[in-house]
């Protein structure tokens, strides 16, 4: 598909000059106003978060760069990045930040903002659908295996109905139906 003028141009590396005219300072304020992001402005770009991150070497935008991009107001680049969805939520970055920047929580904030705009990767929507339909992401023991092992047809005491019912009324439920 041809690139359009409205689509953000993702630089190959952040060494490329940033187009200052595309920055949106309100993005930084929006993130900073969220409950977990008070310390955002205290980041001094030490890269400790990136050094601690087990997956950063696979990412174009490393955790310290994502924080810097938020501070700069690179809304489109951050919210369209695959990195915010690939975060393992291991909290290694957040626990080690000398400035107490809640890096993991800020990436959650970014995911929520992206989801509000319908920017959610297909594989995440598929996982959400699984969760809403079954009330759990992982089946403890598959039906065919239970029979082979002589187990009861379902896990004793396991009830997922409440989880399914709650999720169906949430944005996750609407997302799986093609809504926001
Ligand atoms: S560890 Fe903290 S201060 Fe250092 S770059 Fe990451 S967020 Fe910024
Ligand atoms: S929480 Fe996410 S960004 Fe932080 S270290 Fe883990 S994978 Fe990396």
Image: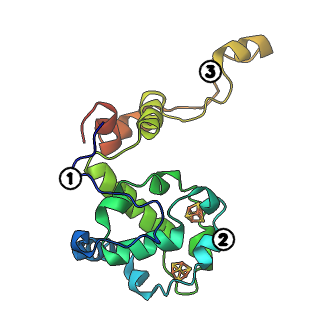
Viewer-nearest residue: 70 or 143: 70
Whether the residues at callouts 1 and 3 have beta carbons within 8 Å, the answer is: no
Label whose residue precedes the other's in the sequence (3 or 2): 2
Q: Residue 154, labelled with which disc?
A: 3
Horizontal and vertical percent position of residue 151:
74, 18
Residue found at x 52% / y 52%: 86
How far apart marks 3 and 2 lie (CA) works out to: 41 Å
Q: Residue 174, labelled with which disc?
A: none
What SS does tag 3 mark? loop
Residue found at x 54% / y 66%: 62
Residue found at x 29% / y 71%: 19
Q: Which residue is mark 2?
A: 52
For the N terminus, the quadrant is top left
The answer to whether mark 2 is within 8 Å of ligand 2 is yes
Of the two numbered discs 2 and 1 in the rendering, the one whose residue sits closer to the viewer? 1
Label whose residue precedes the other's in the sequence (1 or 3): 1
Horizontal and vertical percent position of residue 164:
41, 34
Q: Quadrant of ligand 2?
A: bottom right
The answer to whether mark 1 is within 8 Å of ligand 2 is no
Of the two numbered discs 1 and 3 in the rendering, the one whose residue sits closer to the viewer? 1
Label whose residue precedes the other's in the sequence (2 or 1): 1
- The answer to whether residue 162 is visible is no
For the C terminus, the quadrant is top left
How far apart marks 1 and 3 lie (CA) works out to: 54 Å
What SS does tag 1 mark? loop
């Amino acid at each position: 598909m041809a690139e359009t003028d409205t689509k953000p141009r993702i630089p190959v590396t952040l060494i490329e000059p940033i187009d200052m005219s595309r920055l949106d300072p309100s993005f930084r304020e929006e993130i900073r106003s969220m409950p977990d992001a008070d310390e955002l402005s205290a980041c001094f770009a030490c890269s400790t978060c990136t050094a601690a991150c087990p997956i950063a070497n696979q990412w174009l935008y490393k955790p310290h760069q994502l924080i810097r991009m938020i501070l700069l107001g690179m809304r489109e680049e951050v919210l369209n990045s695959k990195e915010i969805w690939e975060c393992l939520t291991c909290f290694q970055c957040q626990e080690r930040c000398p400035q107490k920047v809640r890096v993991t929580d800020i990436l959650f904030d970014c995911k929520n903002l992206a989801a509000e705009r319908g920017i959610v990767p297909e594989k995440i929507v598929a996982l959400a659908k699984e969760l809403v339909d079954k009330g759990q992401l992982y089946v403890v023991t598959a039906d065919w295996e239970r029979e082979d092992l002589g187990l009861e047809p379902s896990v004793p005491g396991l009830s997922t109905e409440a989880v399914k019912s709650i999720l169906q009324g949430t944005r996750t439920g609407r997302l799986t139906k093609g809504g926001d």
